[in-house]
Image: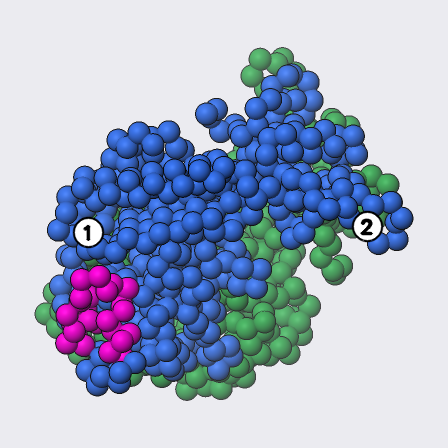
Chain colours: A green, B blue
Amino acid sequence: MPASRSATSLGPGLPARQQSLRDHNLALALRVVSDAGGPVSRAQIAGATGLTRATASTLVELLLAGGLLTETALLTAPGSGRPAVGLALAPGGFGGLGLEVNVDYLAVTVVDLTGEVVLREVLDGDQRGRSPDVVLKAAARLAASALATAHGRGLRVAGTAVSVPGLVRDGRHVRAPNLGWYAVDVLAALRRNPSVAALDLSIDNEANDAARSEVTAELRSFLFVSGEIGVGAGIVLDGVLFRGTRGWAGELGHVSVDPAGPRCRCGAQGCLEVVAGLEAVTRAAGLTPTQGLPHGVALTAAAEAGDGATLAALEAAARALATAIGGALHLLDVGTVVLGGAYARLAPWLVPTLSRCLQERLLWSSWEGPIVRPAAQGAEAASLGGARSVVARLLSEPERWLVT
Amino acid sequence: MPASRSATSLGPGLPARQQSLRDHNLALALRVVSDAGGPVSRAQIAGATGLTRATASTLVELLLAGGLLTETALLTAPGSGRPAVGLALAPGGFGGLGLEVNVDYLAVTVVDLTGEVVLREVLDGDQRGRSPDVVLKAAARLAASALATAHGRGLRVAGTAVSVPGLVRDGRHVRAPNLGWYAVDVLAALRRNPSVAALDLSIDNEANDAARSEVTAELRSFLFVSGEIGVGAGIVLDGVLFRGTRGWAGELGHVSVDPAGPRCRCGAQGCLEVVAGLEAVTRAAGLTPTQGLPHGVALTAAAEAGDGATLAALEAAARALATAIGGALHLLDVGTVVLGGAYARLAPWLVPTLSRCLQERLLWSSWEGPIVRPAAQGAEAASLGGARSVVARLLSEPERWLVT
């Protein structure tokens, strides 16, 4: 696979520059199609990019031959008698794979070039008693099996995005206190599986990847709060993930909600996740986390049954969430909170108290109150967001995938 | 004064477009001079902008005639025998004014086009017993007097940046609970003073303006924490102020540090500023805030004298700051904290505990520990940052200030 190339020098002259000019225009043409939301014609691509019709047609031929675009039914442009051939992203050709390693489950999602889900699988099981090597072997097997299925359906997977419940340093080493990992080279371990080794691998925090899966045309700026055993956040501003100076932004789980609170695995006291994380709430509700029932399923069942201790535990969790999220909103100034992971399932019990406390607490709530809503995606959100980020990368660098 | 014009359409053709092309190039030429850090020649401006020497010379003549540039001694370019006339920002012509309204003082700073301070004045006095009208009349008088002095020295003030200790809505209405202000139209009140009415006025939060004054070539990303009676923060990422979706980001003073803590003026409980703000710490130290000794002067004197209650109060404040700042760093992922306002003066007593607690608390401190340092500027930081923002705006739109 060729290395990524910069396309900043676009002037004519040297062959290398002509090459990057063409690469740049290929991505431009592809973006017109992917942004359109429906089939477009060669003439529309020329119009939107400012390229000549001849150049646009040449680029389209390359993208068709490479399997990135497909021709659709004829389009009739309004005000014009001549129908034109429609062009759309090819659904069957390329795809992206997202693989999530979390504290009590593994998940995989494959999407095609249009972002549609081709397959997904969630494998429940507490990973904490196991060595990183054993966990990552299982994750690699899950990815390899999804890859084989995708290949069997004719899909070419352009890359794999790995989501982890912790910090990633230098794009490699993972610190995830909830897993007992302090500097695990996750990608190196996954590459020991030959099927996975051939893939273009990238890695990010699970809340970041899950937040990506919630961005829509209407929802562009929000704080995504991912609640599982750990609690993380993804900060999205105008459709773009806010990553901080080293990629570690959004560690909401380690915001203090009670300076005298219980000791957290990170070493500090009263962190949000040790007070309102799934395990803490399950324990406060007097429930035993049942094998095979993660993601707050036991809590949800008890809450639905009206169990008093569970309702009280969820009420306390909502108050702790309001303390931490209130601080985050005061610092970041975003208007919408999206509750993801197990919090999405628990939203009916969390949202009323959380909303009320935020309304009381926020300095600007008489001007503009906060909006709190459950996430659209469930436990597969991170792997879905990761898979879509692979496809987004492919669409921005199509030349890497064309045999020319 | 002409309205601000957009310079995005730069193609030749219509006269209007030629006008914006020239305006764009004027700003480009000026930026070469302001970024250079020393005198540059017309040829260097042409080289750096890609303009012809003739065009560069024409623009330079306009900027010289308009009083934005000045000619300096001859420059001898290395490797060239021909000396050229040096060009620099004109120090005497234009300037910017910053006016800060804070809870227990008013401050004004005037800078010239090079950002150098021409005059500054801080007027101590608790503003809380007074109506917004009375406070803003006094502030307008302070600005008018500074303006008159600046004019007397031949400086033309291009605009005034007003800094306030609260939220600004729609560029106008100010909510500052510490002043008891909930929707005060600060600019309208200031404009009642005829000298101020003639000025181009803008308004921002004081911590934002103070943070601007701390940006240097070396310090590009940091959390600026402004500690006075209220506590605010300015978030600077790669030299740019992070403002959030509505300009309200950085309200660190209303991050909770103790859910069971004292009631804050905002209505919530245990906000950082009600625990570690100047008034709270002075009270905890058993001191009476002496009239005429604001900015933590009384606290500093007691700490220097080794007063036990004061040292204990500062230790508790540092711990509360660590709780709130630790949360902010976990969310924002910035590596440096700059303590400003009265916290800068109190830094010798705050920094050791704050640094140690952050080191213990931060998830990534074994990878990269936090850096905590006092601000370079004191109580005049916000008005200095505001005045410099006026000059920065002028340099980016020089055409508004040229008679052509």
Furthest residue in direction left, as rendered: A308
Can the viewer see residue B189? yes
Badge 1 amino acid: Gln
| Chain of the residue on which disc 2 is drawn | B
1 or 2: tag closer to the N-terminus: 2
Residue at x-position 40% and y-position 33%: B200
Measured as percent of width and height from the top left, residue B373 is found at 44, 72
Classify 10 Å Cα crowding around label 1: few (below 14), some (14-19), many (20 and above): many
Residue visible at 65% across and 53% down? B37
Numbered mark located on residue B316 in the image: none
Q: Which residues are magenta?
A: B279-303
Q: Is residue B289 magenta?
A: yes
**Quadrant of the rendering where the N terminus of chain A is positioned:** bottom right
- State the mark number for residue B76: 2
Residue assigned mark 1:
B127
- Amino acid beneath label 2: Thr
Q: Nearer the viewer, residue B177 or A169?
A: B177
State the separation of the CA atoms marked 1 and 2: 56 Å
Q: Position of residue A268 (x, y in %)?
A: 33, 81
- Residue at 72% from the left image edge and 52% from the top image edge: A6
Q: Position of residue B397 (x, y in %)?
A: 55, 34
What is the chain letter for disc 1? B
